[in-house]
Image: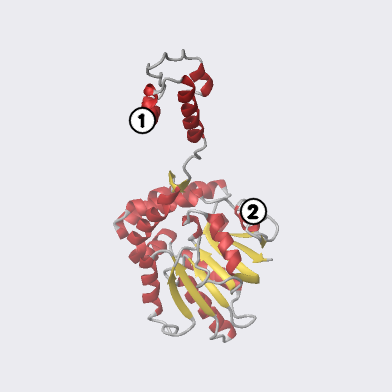
């Protein structure tokens, strides 16, 4: 569309004549009655008003969905479709795609937190629909520290994933006890009446934070609901630093995992998205910056400080303490 200076270079129309329009689809629709104004000044004023209102509109917000860029408001529903599709076969696919290693990573994740060591804890496990982190927390506290009072609230935005977790817990001693509960909620906007400020000792999220539309919003909510000195702990896929391992991992991820998704779950595209979303997640040195910006204290920005690489960086544990 022409600028104001471009417009002023045109010869002004005579009385009763039609104003020259550079964008007939937009300008003519809004100001088609200008041709009835005898005053060029009035038409010019209307045009300038239109130009200013158009230029003041901010560009639409976008988010990544795998390698695609989508409108921000669309990502949540797209991610929901993915996990609705994979919920019933999620654990089977994790076993197949990682050769069972994800179980070792989750064991390591929880054992580093040592729940129950200092007495009963209030924990919240976000994006934890299948319940495997919650179960590990409760088992660790009971087996290592004889703790039967630690509680875990499992939160997930996806109801189908929560159903899988509830079915898992029906087979355990924790079913129908105050030690575990399931809640469908968005970690970016946890209802304050249900998830109050300064309430939890541990906030865990495993292989889920990368799927949220706004990771900073998730971190801010985590900071809000944790008690002072409470621990934020995230287990997530990350960047492999060894060139040879990185090449092998790339080939496996983009060739084998989607194929397994087709064979075991009948859903290639969902697992293709999960692989792509890993590549869009911030690498090890960048994610701790986001954690600190939310108000947490972390270790030094090195492996073994702010984060701990697992298996050469295929997965990574990030931690922060609320200050």
In-front residue for pair 197/130: 197
Where is residue 185, by image quadrant?
bottom left
Q: Quadrant of the C terminus?
A: bottom right
Left or right of 108, for residue 267: left
Q: Secondary structure at mark 1?
A: helix
Residue at which label 1 appears: 29
In-front residue for pair 75/318: 75
Q: Position of residue 205 (x, y in %)?
A: 52, 65
Q: Quadrant of the N terminus?
A: top left
Query: Is tag 2's residue or tag 1's residue first in the polypeptide sequence?
Result: 1
Q: How many marks?
A: 2
> Please, which residue is most extreme toward the right here?
300
Q: Position of residue 216 (x, y in %)?
A: 56, 55
Q: Which mark is residue 289?
A: 2
Between marks 2 and 1 in the image, the one whose residue lies nearer the viewer: 1
Q: Secondary structure at mark 2?
A: helix
In-front residue for pair 176/260: 176
């Amino acid at each position: 569309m022409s600028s104001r200076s471009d417009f002023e270079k045109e010869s002004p129309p005579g009385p009763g004549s039609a104003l020259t329009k550079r964008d007939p689809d937009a300008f003519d629709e809004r100001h088609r009655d200008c041709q009835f104004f005898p005053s060029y000044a009035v038409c010019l004023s209307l045009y300038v008003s239109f130009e200013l209102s158009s230029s003041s509109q901010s560009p639409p917000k976008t988010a990544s969905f795998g390698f695609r860029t989508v409108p921000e408001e669309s990502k949540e529903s797209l991610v929901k479709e993915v996990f609705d599709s994979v919920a019933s076969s999620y654990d089977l696919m994790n076993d197949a795609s990682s050769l069972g290693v994800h179980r070792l990573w989750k064991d390591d994740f929880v054992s580093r937190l040592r729940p129950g060591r200092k007495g009963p804890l209030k924990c919240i496990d976000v994006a934890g629909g299948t319940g495997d982190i919650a179960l590990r927390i409760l088992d660790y506290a009971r087996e290592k520290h004889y703790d039967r009072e630690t509680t875990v609230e499992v939160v997930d935005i996806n109801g189908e994933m929560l159903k899988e977790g509830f079915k898992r817990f029906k087979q355990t001693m924790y079913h129908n006890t105050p030690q575990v509960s399931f809640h469908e909620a968005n970690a970016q906007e946890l209802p304050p009446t249900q998830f109050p400020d300064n309430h939890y000792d541990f906030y865990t999220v495993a292989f889920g934070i990368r799927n949220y539309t706004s990771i900073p919003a998730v971190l801010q909510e985590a900071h809000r609901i944790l008690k002072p000195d409470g621990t934020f702990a995230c287990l997530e896929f990350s960047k492999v630093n060894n060139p040879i391992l990185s090449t092998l991992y790339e080939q496996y991820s983009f060739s084998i995992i989607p194929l397994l998704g087709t064979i075991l779950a009948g859903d290639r595209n969902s697992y293709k998205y999960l692989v792509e979303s890993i590549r869009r997640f911030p690498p090890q040195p960048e994610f701790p910056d986001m954690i600190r910006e939310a108000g947490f204290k972390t270790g030094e920005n090195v492996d073994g400080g702010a984060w701990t690489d697992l298996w050469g960086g295929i997965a990574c544990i990030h931690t922060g303490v609320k200050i």
